[in-house]
Image (spheres, rainbow, N blue to C red):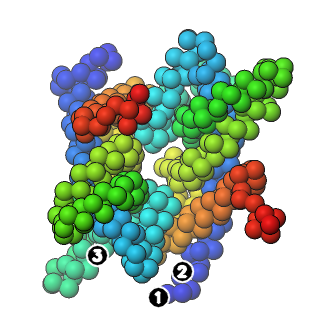
Amino acid sequence: MDFTFLSQTMITLLKAVPMTLALFSASIFFGLFLALLIVWMRVGGNPVLSAIAKGYVFVFRGSPLLIQMFLVFYGLGQFGFIRYSFLWPFLREPFVCAVLSLALCTAGYTAEIFRGGIRAISPREIEAARSIGMSGFVLVRRILAPIAFRHALPAYSTEIVLMMKSTALASLVTVWEVTGVAQRLISQTYRTMEVFLCAALIYLVLNFIILQGMTLLEYSLSRHRRATPAALKA
Amino acid sequence: MATMELIGFGSTGWGALLLLGAATTLAVTATALAIGALLGTIVAGAKLSGNWLLSAMGSLYTTVFRGVPELLIIYLIYFGGSSAMTAIGTAMGYEGFLGLPSFAAGALAVGIISGAYQAEVFRGAYLAISKGELEAASAIGMHRGLRFRRIIMPQVLRFAIPGLGNVWQLSLKDSALVSVTGLAELMRTSQVAAGSTRQYFLFFIIGGALYLILTSLSDRVFNGAERRTNRSMPAAAMGQA
């Protein structure tokens, strides 16, 4: 074991962690908004919007993320109306392309997860809310959204971990996040195993932290379901 | 050049190569699923064994291979496997570099990943078998092997089908990452076609559409299998009442 090399590798790779985190948080943020829009279209009752949402989910869940990313990164520049539009300075950037494709992809999965959460709401809770005169936005904000989010949380935390892993693909469109930097290190040092194992360790730690955070969130949102402590029962 | 000519089957068309790529993608995924089934069974067995060391090792496997990016695992197996092969070759007196075939490396990498997911699927399916049936089997004197073959196996397979369908879809999409090792599967072929004709958008759309066809066809296959294995079950018990 060459500890000086390992520690140097670790330091170099850790410098790329902010880029991985930036990709991760930006795509989760935009993906969440898009997913909410898609869910709203899907369950809103308008057949045309619902069909569009269904098609969106089918396309983005049915094809590999890598092909979607290449489509955005290589494909969009082919069109004159994009190349000469005000969007081009942004879409030329690999980081923007990576975030765009990650967000588009996760939105499809997240929308289905949230739809499952909405389906799990008991109709009686909605009836009760309507009977006391709640409707529209208040109903969504006070009843539907909190219940659906709580039901969807376990599946959503899996999706978030998958997203963290998906950020590695950005290295293939020349974003220098952890995997990309690891590859560059290997081409300089030819020490494949050591560098990739260090990178794997970084991802494991990041995912562990994320999962712990999600478990804490789940715990704090399920106060009403927790068993009464023995001390209070007596 | 006309679009139809580019994607057609003529001498300048990429149609045949793309279909060949799709077939390679299916072959990688099927091999990976088989490798994963073997690994998944072993890991699920270890996690259910009740032996703390075995179950800790099983948990380590599922945690690591579900927590590390697939791309990184493919790189690790491909490059790591090649350096292992070279080391073995050098020990046996062969000079120079020995590469792991990209098909084998890719199928192994995706298989190891799918093994981690399949282990959880099998574990869940085993836990879904009612304890009473296991007790009944022991009570009429079935020994372990017979009980496994007649009671546990058929039910685990039936309960596992929906989960296996998900794992298949995941592996199918993960297999696109094997393109980084240069294996001419669907992703790689689309990439080469896109690069050499400079029609990026066209060929990535076609590649994506072929993936959509593969995923939706396999969805049908798994739904059919689910219906088939549920034939003997009363409709009410399957939640269709």
Q: Is residue B76 left or right of residue B38?
A: right
Decide which of A46, B114 is in the foreground and name it. A46
Quadrant of residue A112 within the rendered picture? top right
- List the residue tagged with mark 1: A1
Which chain is indicated by disc 3?
B
Amino acid found under the numbered disc labelled 2: Leu
Q: Residue at x 31, y 34 (%)?
A: B234
Q: Residue at x 29, y 23 (%)?
A: B6
Which chain is indicated by disc 1?
A
Amino acid found under the numbered disc labelled 1: Met
Q: Is residue A10 left or right of residue B48?
A: right
Q: Residues within 10 Å of mark 1 (few under 14, many from 20)?
A: few
Decide which of A60, A183 is in the foreground and name it. A60
Compared with B112, B233 (above or below) is: above
Residue A100 screen position, x and y as percent:
60, 37
Q: Residue at x 46, y 28 (%)?
A: A58
- List the residue tagged with mark 2: A6
Q: Secondary structure at mark 3?
A: helix
Compared with B39, A220 (above or below) is: above
Report whether residue A145 is seen: yes
Q: CB under 8 Å between callouts 3 and 2?
A: no
Quadrant of residue A92 within the rendered picture? top right
Q: Earlier in the sequence, mark 2 or mark 1?
A: 1
Q: Secondary structure at mark 1?
A: loop
Q: Are marks 2 and 1 on the same chain?
A: yes
| Residue B84 image label | 3
Which chain is indicated by disc 2?
A
Q: CB under 8 Å between callouts 2 and 1?
A: yes
Residue B230 screen position, x and y as percent:
28, 37
Residue A8 screen position, x and y as percent:
59, 78
